[in-house]
Amino acid sequence: MDRSRAPVIRVGAWQWLKSNLFNSAFNTVATILVCVFLYKVIPPFVKWAFIDSLWFSTADQCRAGIGACWSIIPANIRFIIFGFYPYELHWRPAIAMFVLIGLLFYSKNRNHWNKSLGYVWIAGLTIMGILMRGGLFGLTSVESDQWGGLPLTLMLSVFGMFAAYPLGILLALGRRSKMPAIKTLCILYIELIRGVPLISLLFMSAVLFPLFLPTGLTVNKIIRAQAAIILFTAAYIAEVVRGGLQAISRGQYEAAESLGLNYVQKMRLVVLPQALKIVIPPTVGILISAFKDTSLVVIIALYDILKTTRSVLGNPSWMGFSPEAYIFLALLYFVCCYAMSNYSRRLEKELHS
Amino acid sequence: MNDETLKKSIKRSDDNKIIEIIGMHKWFGDLHVLDNICLTVYKGERIVICGPSGSGKSTLIRCINRLEELHQGKIVVDGTELTNNLKNVEKIREEVGMVFQHFNLFPHLTIIENLTLGPIWVRKVPKKEAEEMAMVYLKKVHIEDQAKKYPGQLSGGQQQRVAIARSLCMKPKIMLFDEPTSALDPEMVKEVLDVMINLAEDGMTMIVVSHEMGFAKSVAHRVMFMDFGRIVEENTPQEFFDQPQHDRTKLFLSQILN
């Protein structure tokens, strides 16, 4: 017998079934039940969603049919995606969105993580701002209360994440600081924010916050919601990052110190790269849930993509096709979240040493 | 080994002092871990400190680069007094290299990046120059072919030699060794000791916490024995091993040498 490698055990399909699905009475019953359930559910769903479905029809044709009415999406796609943004100007948020997605794709590559990335982002964000707002270069000005749909969802979540992450790191470092004032402040902040649901923070930003501002001064509603999302997410990131910091051994700090590195260098070059890598999985968890939580801005009357879709369902002719609309929305959210978690897994592998 | 340089005696004069510790005390809670330590180290001197665990020997050398704070007394390193002033502490740490029992290499950086981190960020040496210097030191510790690897891919002995090279890249005036061979497999101890002996031949000021008595005999100018936070006995290696004065030292040596 060849002892230079572990023996390979081959199993046939039947053997595999027998040992995995029918290896006990309980498993046999469970397997049969699951098969029956799938048989009952999947064919009707396929029939509804694909065979009998209508893709590009009017609402009336849909009502006559028996399958899914996907037509609700193409018929209303521009409102779903752009909300109340002036119809003839939709190309502007469309380009802005592509710029943002382009920026994200460009930033994915670790070879691009250098100083010029900052300039690329500043340029990209400026272009986005000009496109969305207008009022410059002969573009018609569009007030921010007309913004909505997918661009709003993307902006709230992307900016929310990118601002919350560094803020969370600072809070985590602050919480571990030896300076009592900073430490207390950070603990207070983190615990207060974590003790409050995001909805109430959004309410506060919408209702309470303006009361404290001097009369005449107003802060844009989107910015207030954005701030609430950032402050909320940062508190959670802070605790995850603190967990990562605690996983770094005392020896790493001491080795960095004994080389003469100062606090900032020690953290930036030695501790944080290791700590942040450890906490990639929970961090991405928080970012994903922050992305989904942006849909809560609906309660302060911002039209994110969930709200625009629901508005379409409020239209009498399209009423009643909510499964189709929500499935579409779910897919959209899923694609974004899956992309994030996929990227994080790749990043983890790349950073693995 | 070049016995000439190793045997050369040290000039013990005031202008040749590099470390001066006066009346140092330190407590860990109720434990009086350093009890009135007085120690003067001269340039080029090599001191080996031994003693049972918990006797304060590691704490003593960790105070020299302020990884531990002292509660009473005074330490002057290379003319700078260690105070709470962060700038002073950082300045002293630049001049004092330290090698740890558990190596403490930075696992997320390659070997060459481990070596150049300090020079580039603390000494502000241009990257290319720092890398050339790092290669010189890697050659010195005989692992120049591992430069692009990560610490996790190296054996314990190799890692410890990298750690020594990393400290040397800062061009320190003093090297502290905190039980550098205690975490190593027996067959790797020698390769690390050889590197340390080479360093001694170059005239480096070294304070070594170690139980490698062979190393102490051949390299040290002075051997110290610590117990309960006090320096119980100090002498030249010859006197120390041949005619220990205190009973505690005798007991310790009899246990460690047999």
Image: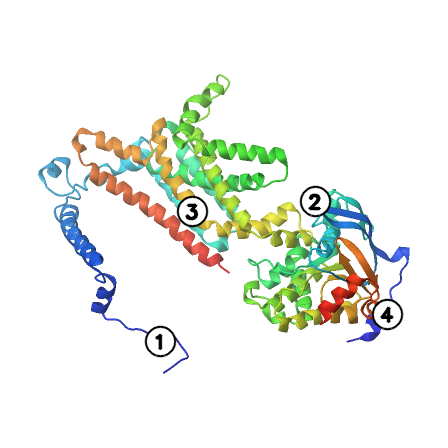
**Mark 1 vs mark 2: same chain?**
no
Label 2 vs label 3: CA separation?
45 Å
A154 relative position to B35: left or right: left
Mark closest to the chain's N terminus, 1 or 3: 1
Label 4: few (<14), some or many (≥20) within 10 Å?
Answer: few
Task: Identify which amino acid the numbered label 2 is placed on.
Answer: Asp
Numbered disc in front, either 2 or 3:
2
Mark 1 secondary-structure assignment:
loop
Task: Identify which amino acid the numbered label 4 is placed on.
Answer: Lys
| x, y percent for residue A105 | 41, 50
The residue pinned by badge 1 equals A7
Query: Mark 3 and mark 2 in contact (Cβ < 8 Å)?
Result: no
Q: Is residue B231 visible?
A: yes
Q: Is residue A119 visible?
A: no
Task: Identify which amino acid the numbered label 3 is placed on.
Answer: Val
Q: Chain of mark 4?
A: B
Query: Mark 3 and mark 1 in contact (Cβ < 8 Å)?
Result: no
Q: Chain of mark 3?
A: A
Question: Where, by quadrant of the figure, is residue B222 drawn?
Answer: bottom right
Up/down of A242 relative to B231, above or below: above
Mark closest to the chain's N terminus, 4 or 2: 4
Residue pictured at 78% horizontal, 49% vertical: B35
Direction bottom: furthest residue: A1
The residue pinned by badge 4 equals B8
**Mark 1 vs mark 4: same chain?**
no
Pick the residue in front: A318 or A16.
A16
Tag count: 4
